[in-house]
Structures are given as C-alpha cells and as structure tokens.
Image (cartoon, rainbow, N blue to C red):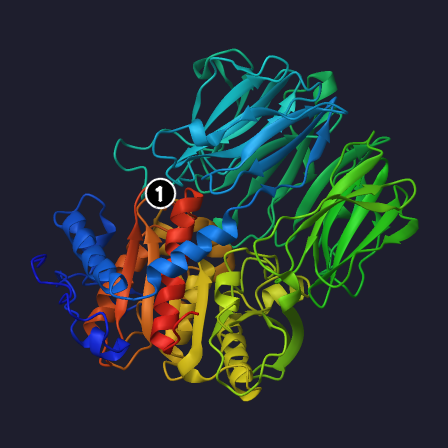
C-alpha cells in the first residue's frame, strides 16, 4: 500500500551538501501488482501498470506523496527563491510575435511583462493596435490559453481555439473582426486540427467525445472532418470525411488561399507511413467527392500547398531527401506527372512560403538559416541577406503581399523582427527586442564532433564571452533527435539565468531531426534509434574533452522525445554526467501506442506489437525497461497531470522503478505540475518549473548562484 505519512525531510537540512540531503529522502512506497505481458514469446513484467489508470485507487495519493517529497527537497535549496526572482526579472519585459497581414489588418501578439499569456492585437494599416483576444481573461486561474487563430479570406470573421490546462483538446469559437464580438459558436472535442475557411465556413477535424472522465488517456480514434458555418450550432455541422475502417488515421481538409481547391490529407503514421495521401476537389464547382492527387499514404511528405495559374505547388521529399518544390495539375494525379520548380540542393529545404507572387525558401546550412527568393517558375531572384549566422523564421504572406515579416535570433540573441520588401529585397528592422541583460556579454559557438560511427554532428554552445575551457563550468546539454524536427537554436530569456552563473548551454543537433534532410532523420528512427543515443553520448564526451565542463558539472536535458533520449542515455551511461532532467518523456516504449495519439508515433519508433524485431529493438532502449540496480545521476523528472499527448503514466512508472533501483546517494525525484499539459499552461508555471530545474541542477553541481 502507499505510505504517504513518512516525513520527506528534516527541517534542519538546508545547509547540508546535496548528497547528505539526498540520503535523508524517503520516497513514497509504490504498490506493485503481478502483471506480465507476452511479446512474441518474451515475457515482460509490468508491476506498476496500475499507475496508468488515472482513476486507480491510491494514484492521487501517490502523486501527492511524490510531490511532497520533491517540493520538500527543492524547498531546502538555499538559492531557489533568488533564482526564481531572477527569472521574473529577465521575463518582465514586453515580448512581441512576428506580425502577419490579412486583408486590411495586421495581427500580432504581445506579452506584457509577467502576464501569463500573450495578448492578440488587431491593427489597421496606419492605425493603432487594439486588443482582439486576451487569454489572460479566459479563466480565473490563468491556465486557459489561445491555440489556433485563422481569419476568413475576406477578414470578416476569425476562428480561434481555447485550450484548458495545457490540454491538446481545443474548443473553437468564432469572432467578428470588425465588431470584436464573439458569435455563439462553440465547437468541442477538437484535437490535431487546423481551421481552413471556405467563404464564411471552415473545415476542422475532431474526435467523438471520449467517455466522461477518460479524456486524458483514452485512445484517440476515428478522426473526422467537419464543415462549420459561422453563426450555427455544432450539431448542424456537415460531416465531410470519415473512414471507419481505419480508426487510427488523421484526416485534415485545407483550402488553397484562393479557396478554389480543397485538399484532403490522410495520415497513416500508426502503420509506419511517414507521409500522407493527398486528395483534391474543386470547391469553386461545389464538388462533393475528393479525387486522388497522391493516392496512398507513404514514406513521402507533401507540405505547403498553394494554387497559382492552374498549378498546385507543394514541397515534397518524394524523389528528393532534402526536399524540392514541384507543381502539379489537379487533374493529373501522381508525382510522375508533376514538374520540378525548385530542385533539391545539398542543403535541406526547411520551408517554402508563397507570398507576393514569389516562393521564399528557407534552407539549413549546418543548422543555420539561408533564405532564397524564387519566381513562381523557379528562377532564382536573390538570396535574402540575414543579419548573421542564426535562425530565421516567418516569410509567410498572401499573393497580394508587398512585404513579409520574419524574425531572426540565436541561442544568445533575442529575436529581432524584420519587414522584408519582396520587390526590392530590402530588410528593415520592424521591432527590436527588449532585454533585461547585456547581450554583449554572451556568445554562441558552432562546434562539430564525431559520433561513435564517425558521423560528423553539429553542436552549438552559448556562454559568457571569455569562457575558460578548464572543465569547471556548469553545463546543460540539450537534445531532441526525432520526428524530423530540427534542434531549436532560438533564444530564451530564462536561459540567461543559467548563463549568468558561468553556465554553458549546449544544443546537440543529433540524428533523427531534419538538420541534414530526410537521410539525417531516417538515420535516427525505428531500427536506427540507437544512433541518436550514441550521438548524445558523444556530445557529452566532447564537451568534457574540450574543457567546457566535467562529469560533476554536466546535466542532460530533453522533453517529450527528448525525455526518452535522456532516460535511454542515463541507462546506457550513468557514469557520463551528474544530473538528468527528463521532461514529459516517452519512457515506456512497449506501450506508448496504447494512449491518446501515441499510435501516431509508430511511424517514428515502430511498435512492440508489430514484429519481433521491432519489439526487441524497442525493448533494448526503453528507459523504463532498462533500469537496473545502479548508481544513477541526480534526476528530476517533470510531467503534468493534464498531459494528454505523452500521458504522465510514462513518468509515473519510470520514477517508481528508478526509486526502487537507485543504489547511489543522488536524489531521484518527480515534479508533477497541476493544470498543465505537454507544455506549461502559462508563464508562471513555466518559470516555476525552470527555476526548479535550474536550482536542482546547480545545487547538485555544487554551484551557488551569484
């Protein structure tokens, strides 16, 4: 049975060293059950299976007991409150998003000081900004946020989404942009959806309402597309597409900017298909049936559809691992009938935006941005001059746009917003960032290291200028490595609190992402997943060999797929580093596909239920299943009670097993946030979590913040 009455900490321990403090910890006892599963003749024990059930007797008490121990430990860290205050100081500034133009309006978001959410503003060209939507007023506790926002083509209406407590579930609403008044529309059980207008109605995707009380872990099946007309009830919505024979597929319908064509995307990632089928219909002719453009889901992706002069333009990796732009006739299906407009380059194409009758293409050169402007026939017009090495995002606009906005930043430089004139190629600063620190005090270095198999891997390290490479610096090594997502090299105000302490924040651009195109992605997925862990291990070794840090001063950090990364590396090399910070991690690789939309990750990982080979591969690195009695690094697992993407049961089962098998003196704790999801539900909760992660890491490293 659970024991929730044990004292977490004595009150006199604040001045003790981390090891002594950890030795006084008494973890909550976690009930075991006699449960086994059989995979291809292999028996696997699952004694903490009961923690998957959010209604299980004792689970709430177990969560409360774990938090009591964790926060009791964190409360004893002498500088925790001071570090939390510094995070407030760094974030107590106005932060703006990159604007976008639509019809007569400019839209942008602004977060004022320490407000929990950014406010969405509307502004006529030459006019004054006015508040359109303020998520800070959506709920009393500040945990309901703004998700999607999409204006209609004529800018009369806009659809927007509300998300409660960080959940992936959304409620869609409609607002009149001229009057700023909401219509009575309320659209529920929306998940994994956008909103695409056709006239004064829009397409969206939703699931059937899950059984009451099972929203968090209920497996999401039967994704359907509906059409909603502004000002009507959800019960009147038209069912546009469903596929009862394939319950674990995603379905979306989008429209081209001119609303002439509707495109149905059918994703079958639950059956190892990385890319969708694409079907099309002519909306201007009120066609009811979709016809194939790319008939079946496959391993090829199709992104960013745009209609111009009878052609459908799309970015694809079909026939081009680094992506190319092609154009296709709507009545001639198949990639073989498409023309290449912008051929594949040696540098991977990260995005292609269509604006002002041009194609603005962002490439990645050793993970830094390079942007080229092309005519619609593929003729290169110019390279857009960026301020320097870093990351550029944006460049989206409409066909009639004269200019577009983009942002530019790096690990140590806050985002500056630029207005780019398409006709002249001139970029001007639209808005400079506010800062609460001296940006000149820091720098970012681009480095390269070799992985276990000799692969050259990029790494970026941000730190104070004049850093001594003597191994004495506290360091956080961050990684993700999956789902074709590139490493994030963007700026964070909060990260400065760590850099100010002489810290090094390093990002390893490991395989599994899109840094070097689809080949780089596939080298880190399915049966190749071990490459990702080898890369991260090599990055940690490299930082120590080069004198950036040492074992006693190194923490590994990652979230979601990155949480899996930290957990797997901790099992394989517990001697390599001193602190582990796995967040919302996928820790049970044998059962991830059983919860919510976890089946969607089968295309990336494989499935333990599919083949014996895939089972053995997953079993070989699953963080939960490879824990054994050992001395593990100090660990602070973070998760949230409303995470309905990577359900918290992953972290619950993992920490129960880790606490059972920890043989060293370092603490292994779990921090369970309430009313948050896969990401923090507001700024305050985000800063609370970061303060605890940084405090925990620095305390274990023996570093007292100045």
- Image quadrant holding the N terminus, namely bottom left
Q: Does 58 sit left or right of 513 as displayed?
A: left
Residue at image mark 1: 219
| Local secondary structure at mark 1 | loop
Give the camera-side residue of 206 and 121.
Answer: 121
Quarter occupied by residue 585: bottom left
* Residue at 30% in and 46% down: 641
Residue in the picture at 8% in, 59% down: 3
Depth check: give the residue in front, 150 or 493: 493
Residue 83 x, y percent position in the rendering: 40, 60
610 left or right, relative to 98: left
Quadrant of image for the C terminus = bottom left
Q: Is residue 565 above or below residue 283?
A: below
Q: Is residue 319 visible?
A: yes
Quick one: label 1, few (<14), some, or many (20+) residues within 10 Å?
some
Q: Tell me residue 553's x, y (percent).
A: 43, 79
- Which residue is depicted at the point 55% across and 86% down? 547
């Amino acid at each position: 049975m659970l024991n929730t009455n044990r004292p977490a900490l004595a009150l006199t321990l604040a001045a003790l060293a981390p090891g002594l403090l950890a030795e006084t910890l008494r973890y909550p006892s976690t009930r075991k059950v006699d449960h086994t599963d059989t995979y291809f003749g292999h028996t696997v024990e699952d004694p903490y299976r009961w923690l998957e059930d959010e209604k299980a007797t004792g689970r709430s008490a177990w969560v409360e007991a774990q938090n009591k121990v964790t926060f009791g430990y964190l409360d004893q860290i002498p500088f925790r409150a001071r570090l939390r205050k510094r995070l407030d100081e760094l974030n107590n500034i106005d932060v703006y998003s990159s604007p976008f133009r639509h019809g007569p309006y400019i839209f942008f978001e602004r977060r004022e000081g320490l407000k929990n959410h950014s406010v969405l503003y509307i502004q006529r060209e030459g006019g004054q900004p006015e508040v359109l939507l303020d998520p800070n007023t959506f709920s009393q506790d500040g945990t309901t946020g703004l998700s999607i926002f999409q204006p209609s083509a004529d800018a009369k209406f806009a659809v927007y989404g509300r998300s409660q407590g960080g959940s992936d579930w959304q409620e869609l609403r409609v607002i009149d942009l001229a009057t700023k008044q909401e219509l009575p529309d309320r659209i529920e059980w929306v998940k994994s959806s956008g909103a695409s207008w056709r006239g004064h109605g829009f397409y969206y995707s939703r699931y059937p309402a899950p059984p009451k009380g099972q929203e968090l872990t209920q497996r999401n099946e039967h994704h359907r597309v509906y059409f909603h007309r502004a000002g009507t009830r959800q019960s009147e919505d038209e069912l546009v597409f469903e596929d009862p024979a394939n319950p674990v597929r995603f379905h979306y319908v989008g429209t081209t900017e001119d609303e002439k064509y509707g495109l149905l995307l059918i994703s079958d990632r639950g059956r190892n298909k990385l890319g969708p089928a694409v079907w099309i219909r002519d909306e201007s002719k009120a066609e009811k049936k979709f016809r194939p453009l790319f008939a079946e889901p496959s391993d090829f992706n199709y992104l960013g559809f745009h209609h111009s002069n009878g052609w459908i333009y799309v970015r694809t990796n079909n026939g081009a691992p680094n992506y190319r732009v092609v154009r296709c006739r709507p009545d001639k299906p198949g990639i073989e009938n498409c023309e290449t407009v912008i051929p594949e380059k040696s540098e991977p194409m990260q995005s292609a935006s269509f604006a002002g009758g041009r194609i603005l293409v962002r490439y990645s050169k050793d993970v830094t941005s390079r942007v080229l402007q092309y005519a619609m026939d593929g003729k290169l017009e110019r390279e857009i001059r960026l301020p320097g090495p870093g990351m550029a995002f944006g460049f989206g606009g409409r066909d009639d746009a004269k200019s577009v906005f983009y942002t530019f930043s790096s690990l140590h430089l806050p985002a500056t917003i630029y207005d780019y004139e398409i006709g002249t190629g001139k970029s001007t600063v639209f808005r400079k960032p506010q800062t609460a620190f001296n940006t000149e005090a820091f720098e970012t270095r681009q480095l390269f290291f070799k992985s276990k198999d000799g692969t050259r891997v990029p790494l970026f390290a941000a730190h104070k200028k004049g850093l001594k490479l003597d191994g004495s610096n506290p360091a956080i090594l961050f990684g993700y490595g999956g789902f074709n997502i590139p490493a994030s090299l963007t700026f964070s105000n909060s990260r400065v609190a760590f850099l100010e302490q002489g810290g090094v924040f390093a990002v390893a651009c490991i395989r599994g992402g899109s840094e070097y195109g689809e080949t780089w992605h596939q080298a880190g997925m399915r049966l190749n997943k071990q490459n990702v862990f080898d890369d991260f291990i090599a990055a940690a070794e490299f930082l120590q060999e080069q004198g950036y840090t040492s074992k006693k001063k190194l923490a590994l950090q990652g979230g979601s797929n990155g949480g899996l990364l930290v957990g797997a590396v901790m099992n394989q090399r517990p001697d390599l580093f001193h602190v582990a910070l796995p967040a919302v991690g996928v820790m049970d690789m044998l059962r991830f596909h059983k919860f919510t939309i976890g089946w969607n990750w089968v295309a990336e990982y494989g499935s333990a239920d599919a083949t014996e080979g895939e089972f053995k591969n997953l079993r070989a690195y699953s963080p939960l299943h490879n824990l054994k009695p050992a001395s593990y690094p100090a660990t602070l697992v973070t998760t949230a009670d409303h995470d309905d993407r990577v359900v918290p049961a992953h972290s619950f089962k993992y920490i129960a097993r880790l606490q059972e098998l920890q043989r060293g003196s370092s603490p292994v704790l779990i921090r369970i946030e309430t009313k948050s999801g896969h990401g923090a539900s507001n700024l305050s909760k985000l800063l609370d979590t970061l303060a605890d992660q940084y405090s925990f890491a620095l305390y274990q490293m023996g570093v007292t913040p100045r």
